Image (tube, rainbow, N blue to C red):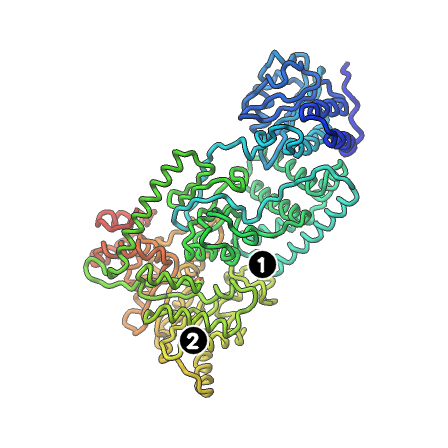
Amino acid sequence: MTNAPPPPTSAAQSARTILTRLHEVMAARTNAQSKLNQVVGIIGECLDSEVCSIYLLREGALELYATRGLKQEAVHVTRLGLGEGLVGTIAEQIETLNLDEAAAHPDFSYRPETGEELFHSFAGVPIIRRERAVGVLCVQHAEPRRYEEIEIETLQTVAMVLSELIANADLVDTAARIDAGETDQSMQRLSGQKLVDGMGAGIAVFHQPRVHIEHTVADDIEAERHRVYAAFDKMREQIDRMASQAEFGVGGEHEEVLETYKMFAYDEGWSRRINEAIDSGLTAEAAIERVQQRTRMRMRQIDDALLRDRMHDLEDLSNRLIRIVSGQMGTAAQVGLRQDSILVARNLGPAELLEYDRRRLKGVILEEGSLTAHVIIVARAMGVPVLGRVRDVRTSIREGDMLLLDAAAGTLHVRPTQAVQDAFDAKLVISQKRRASLASLRDLPAVTKDGVPIELMINAGLREDVAALDLTGARGIGLFRTEFQFLVSATLPQRERQQRLYRDVLDAAGDRPVIFRTVDIGGDKALPYMNVDENALEENPAMGWRALRLALEREGLLKVQARALMEAAAGRTLNVMFPMVSEPWEYEAARQLFINQRAWLKQHNKKLPSAIRYGAMLEVPGLIETLDLMLPHLDFLSIGTNDLTQFLFAADRAHPRLAERYDWLSPTVMRYLARVVKMVAGSKVTLGVCGEMGGRPLEAMALLGIGIERLSITPAGVGPVKAMIRSLDLGALRRDVPAILAHPAANPRGQYLDWAQKHQVDLGE
Ligand code: PEP
Ligand code: MG
């Protein structure tokens, strides 16, 4: 017969009894060791366990700090490495073990000095701080038996409180040493997808800083319950608002994520478990974290990618709830960057990124992200390297860790060793040299080896971007995204503000042309201050009420912009371009609006632009069917390959899972573009490409191969693309491209790459 104790009436009650007693111990003015001795005594007694021990991580090993039931001589003597023995396994795997026969477990490691051979059953839980194990709390029993679920729960709750106590210098003299923040300094290497090229070093700053829970034991349970109720209400409100405003719409998966958010936010089981944790004596913050820890542990055992994603969502929501309950709601941008930093986020909106100080922002790490999402375009314009699709961010990186980002290599070094840091610095010097040699191309013409001049312009969107004209030696601005001003403003920019920006840009550009694109709002560029009811329920914002569609219906908006542009360009040539034209009548309506505004200005004796050139963007594939009808009325046509390809492939440009699925060099894109070139040839319309595609040397080469001779690209691309152009025999390429288009290989990229290598084209790689 076993003398197993009767199970406690409820996990909450037994935890609460222990927590109340622990509270008293901690408040007492005794030294750390005697506190720990009392703690193991209380836990052992309350759980009726013959042994209760606490192991803490010290100098990389788990050291027995206190025990009731094992031999006292073993205290501070028995040490187990991470992964060694049951205790080391619990800490390494961050998992709970509940065994009726400890010695039968493959990881069991016998330590004679402890006298533990007397005990058969074993249960241990990790003591976690900042998602890392800093110790292990375990109980043992002479009789073989499994501990009840509620006893395990109690141990886990107690472990949580212990983690607060351990971090508190009162408990352990050298608390700092056992805090995971200090002990685990090992380097980690994470990999991801290059979204914006470049290298950067800085400390890790989380876009949404993690709240550190300071108090885990509740003084007033009723008050804690109220705090958590109120926080749930607020969180649900926020989620509902997000859903209705599409404010969250920065990632392609946002619909799915929002649905999951909603599901969790309204999940009774989740709120019930948090309330139970509060009943056991925890504060609201600690209760939310406690439930989260439990879920994390459970999910760790399930190998299912989909579930892991959902887990991610629950983590997000849990963090949000903790931030609400603790009143710490701001993003890192509001606090400001204090030194060179690398920003870490799940995903970001373009406006959110723009809130950071460009001088100190050295890189961005995203758990999601895709090449043509607007936040990436903004980052590219800011010259900030971005690595996307990085996994295990939360478990591998801590706030303040040193990070080295090498986007081209697709790697991120966390807490680098000196050797890695030195290698990184050396590579940085080489890349700076390469940049310097590209910069030396600045004043050289973009002409192919066989003498064909190529017009290289830059894409811009902010006042500061214009400086890139001088830095790169570009011929002008081929795409000025006017909506960026709208995105960074807290309110709708009025005409004067718009006009000031346009004038500044034109002044800075001097005699170099600037093509202003009228606002492309909507899609992933939602404006929080603009009341777009009609947009509220959009399921497909990228294909929805955006860009010219919105501008033509919000005529006031477009009229104001037209006036601002014309007044800013008084006495000079104004180049204006309309986004997302789907049918000729839309272009005609927009052009007519400008003509009317011009007439109005003339009537009011305002100074007018010396000329207005009108253009359209080709982003909607269907426009090709009526392009011939539009050509006579167009001055120029600019192909926006970002949107064009998402519509050609029916693949959301911001969807992280689709980011690498389709290639710009695929025959689908290249043949389509070749058709457009053919249609436009012979007309007076100038044709160019202004999507991200043109900013990559190999893609740019392919575009030249099918007859494109004007590119507007991200400023960072000008040097590398110019180097490619100057090393290219365009005549030879044009002779060979028809064969590639006619007989595309399974990997068309390889075909262009082979050609480039064979003909010694400088692709900079
Ligand atoms: C495009 O779609 O290719 C483009 C240049 O416009 P944006 O990226 O701003 O949508
Ligand atoms: Mg576009």
Q: Residue at x 33, y 59 (%)?
A: 471
Q: Residue at x 39, y 65 (%)?
A: 479
Q: Residue at x 61, y 26 (%)?
A: 56
Camera-near label (1 vs 2) is 2
The reply to whether discs 1 and 2 touch (Cβ–Cβ < 8 Å) is no
Under mark 1, the amino acid is Glu
- Residue 152 is labelled as none
Q: Is residue 481 above or below residue 81?
A: below
The residue furthest left is 450
Label 2 belongs to which residue?
568
Q: Earlier in the sequence, mark 1 or mark 2?
A: 1
Residue in front for this viewpoint, 302 or 187:
187
* Ligand 2 rendered quadrant: bottom left
Residue 628 lies in what quarter of the image? bottom left
Label 1 belongs to which residue?
247
Residue 620 is at least partly visible in this image? no
Residue 685 x, y percent position in the rendering: 32, 72
Count neighbours of disc 1 (C-alpha within 10 A) and say few if under 14, some if 14 to 19, many if 20 or more: some
Residue 237 lies in what quarter of the image? bottom right
Q: Quadrant of the N terminus?
A: top right
Q: Is residue 592 above or below residue 78?
A: below
Residue 447 in the figure: left or right of residue 392: left
Residue 698 x, y percent position in the rendering: 31, 52
Label 2, secondary structure: give it: helix
Residue 704 in the figure: left or right of residue 601: left
Residue 10 x, y percent position in the rendering: 78, 32
